[in-house]
Image (tube, helix red, strand yellow):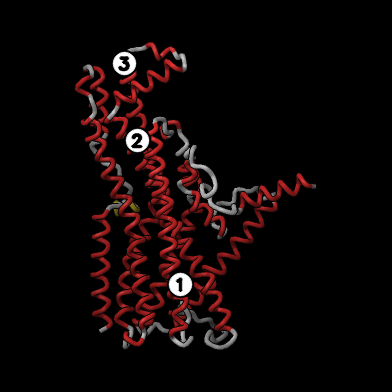
Amino acid sequence: MKILTKNIKDKLSTLLPVLPYGVLESWDDLDPKLYHAIHIYWLKFYGMWYNNFSPFNILFWIQIIYTLIILWLVCFLPGIGEVVYLLKRKENIGDIAEGLYLFLSEMYTYFKIAVFWLNKDKVMNLIKYLYCEEFKPVEAEHKEFIRKSIKTARFVMTYYSTMCVGAVSVGIIMPITENFDILPTNVEYPYFNVYTSPAYQILYVHHIYYKPATCIIDGVMDTILAAFIASTIGQIEILAFNLRNFDVVAERRRKRAINEHKATGALSEDYHIRTVLRDCIIHHNSIIRYVSMIENAFSLASALQFMLSVMVLCLIGVQFLSIENPSSHPMQIMWMAIYLTCMLFEVFILCWFGDELIWKSLDLRQAAFEGPWLKTNAATRKYIIIFLERCKRPLRVTAGKIFVLSLDTYTVLINWAYKAFAVMSNMKK
């Protein structure tokens, strides 16, 4: 009986861990799941992670039921209310803008979840690929690069989600400053008045739950792509170090081979240098393949996110103009300003990581050129030439083969949002 109880507890802890991996566990082994541990934790918390149980296992059906309940509370119920609200106010562009920007930003979160589920095999292959032999750190410097990239991935997820939850907290307390004449999100339902008791109190409590939940899920879906790119950047930094110091790395390998009594320890220095450079080319090929896998898994969701972000940004601007007597609604102005900031950060994170990937990959050519290749023979220099040829095109991730994730794209998107805002503000006038 005790063994059965322990097995059930172990399975439940797998279904919903108490804390993200890496909070209490040591980082000494630099397990690649540290990159996505916080993302996976929150997806499991809200029932959005993949159901890996057999249909014949009771935990499979528990997770299905739990996921459906969460989806009803955070997606379907508020989504229905927002659609009804929009249909009743279709004549007023200000009211449409007010309801539509929240509806779009929330609904495309769950579109990203749907794409995430459909791409289960691709995402799981990405996670497994991080365990490949080429990506394992060997030198002490390698481990520092990996540790830094893990910290970056976890930092972005934690602080971006915290910022979003803080933003919606302003929206949650906004009805208090408006004498409870409004709800945090504009919703209406066909068969009852949301502003009468007890419907208002029930819906207000529901908003206190669902809005932070939506923010956390959205934060996970926005930053999980950034985490994969961060892991790629860590590998590129390792590769750049090996290229700049291939003679040092070769000498360390030779000494390890001697200490471990391997036959390769007796081979020449040139042999070990060529081995290091050959491994650099193999490592680079693995990184190229990994970037291609990232794009295949997240391209569609990123493209839709960029296009909808432009719409949401211009709708928020229109809503700003629609507020009559702004001085009497300071909390509403603050809520929209903070929400706008979160939307700008959401797109900026992906573009910044994409831009870093481009520049780090371009730096590989410089790293190869800065290496001590002048001290090597002609046969060894051929490896450098092959690598330089491979680095002519920078690594980059695109969104739907339309947008390149870069700061240049971010500037273009903000420009589009402003132009759309100018058109819609003129229509309002």
Q: Whole-Å distance between the Cαs marked 1 and 3?
A: 62 Å
Are circles 2 and 3 on residues that touch, CB within 8 Å?
no
> Horizontal and vertical percent for residue 252?
36, 23
Which circle's residue, 2 or 1, is located before the other in the chain?
1
In the structure shown, which secondary structural element does the residue marked by tag 2 occupy?
helix
Q: Give residue 142's position: percent from left, percent from top.
A: 38, 35
**Which residue has dot 2 on it?**
238
Residue 169's label in the rendered image is 1
Q: Which residue is drawn at 52% across and 52% down?
A: 40
Q: Are the residues flagged by discs 1 and 3 in contact, CB closer than 8 Å? A: no
Residue 211 badge: none
Mark 3 lies on residue: 269
Toward the viewer: 368 or 423?
368
- Residue occupying the far right of the picture: 1
Q: Label 2 is placed on what type of residue?
A: Ile
Distance (Cα) linking label 2 and label 3: 21 Å
**Label 3 element class:** helix
Give amino acid for label 1: Ser
Question: In this image, 296 relative to 418: left or right?
Answer: right
Q: Which of 411 and 147 is in front in this view?
A: 147
The secondary structure type at the circle numbered 1 is: helix
| Mark 2 crowd level (few <14, some 14–19, many ≥20, 10 Å Cα) | many
Check disc 1: other Cα within 10 Å, few if <14, some if 14-19, many if 20+.
some
- Would you call the spot at circle 3 few (<14 residues within 10 Å), some (14-19), or many (20 or more)? some
Q: Taking 94 as reference, is 264 above or below it?
A: above
Label located before the other in sequence (2 or 3): 2
